[in-house]
Amino acid sequence: MVDMSDPSERGDPAGGTGDRGLPGAGLVKGLAVTLKTMTSRSTTQQYPDVTPELPPRSRGVIALSEENCTVCMLCARECPDWCIYIDSHKEEVAVPGAARPRQRNVLDKFDIDFSLCMYCGICIEVCPFDALYWSPEFEYAEYDIKDLLHDKDHLGQWMATVPPPSAHDPNGEPAKEETSAARKASAARPAPPAVRPGADQDPAS
């Protein structure tokens, strides 16, 4: 049974400091932060006269590489806002030596409604063929909300603003493609001829 007569058991600040620290310590820390902010010089970026320096991987607008899109519909299905609209048709491609022609999907429509997009990046992460990229460009405001619906041609124009990928970490694990290519190269390389024991010795000796 807990003795309620002990002030420390009741959590009484007057009964002991414990983990609470000194009375008023939080107030002192807050005033110190306020004083530091008041004495430091503030810097204002004169936008739009001065372009802000954004991180290279800023989530500005989504760019589309049309030639990489296979119309797998993963981005449209995984989008939580349903702001991606895709339409396509199938074409037959004659393959020499094949018994019958193959079919491939041809992209007809790829629209993203940026008035609904919440920039979560799920569509870019789930794309298995690297058809969608982040661009740091953010100056695409419109007077009419309908103009925020970008079609595949408009999305393709943003590809010129996509920054190059960052360098691979030398201490990190190599990519699966690099490992597979190195394994195939080592398998295709002919093995050195075996040296018989005593073949490198001088016959005269």
Image (cartoon, rainbow, N blue to C red):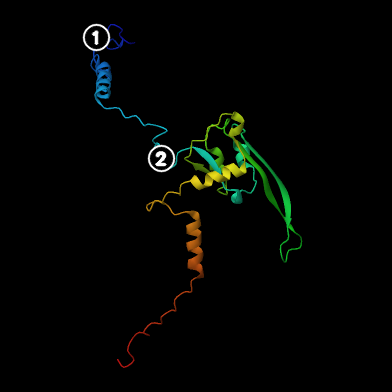
109 to 21, vertically: above or below? below
Binning the other alpha carbons within 10 Å of mark 2 as few (below 14), some (14 to 19) or many (20 upward) gives few
Nearest the camera: 175 or 65?
65
The residue at 26%/22% (across/down) is 38
- Residue 184 lies, in percent from the top left, at 51, 64
Residue with the mark numbered 1: 14
Nearest the camera: 113 or 5?
113
Residue with the mark numbered 2: 55
Instruction: Single out the residue that lies furthest toward the right.
Output: 100
Q: Amino acid at mark 2?
A: Pro
Q: Is 107 situated left or right of 176 in this image?
A: right
Image marks 2 and 1: residues in contact by CB distance under 8 Å? no
Q: Quadrant of residue 100?
A: bottom right
The residue at 61%/43% (across/down) is 152
N-terminal of the pair, mark 2 or mark 1, is 1
Locate the N terminus by quadrant: top left
Nearest the camera: 72 or 108?
108
- Residue 52 lies, in percent from the top left, at 40, 36
Nearest the camera: 96 or 158?
158
Q: Is 102 situated left or right of 77 in this image?
A: right
Q: Amino acid at mark 1?
A: Ala
The residue at 28%/6% (across/down) is 5
Q: Is 90 situated left or right of 125 in this image?
A: right
The residue at 62%/31% (across/down) is 146
Front position among marks 2 and 1? 2
6 to 77, vertically: above or below? above
Residue at disc 1, secondary structure = helix
Instruction: Single out the residue that lies furthest toward the front.
Output: 49
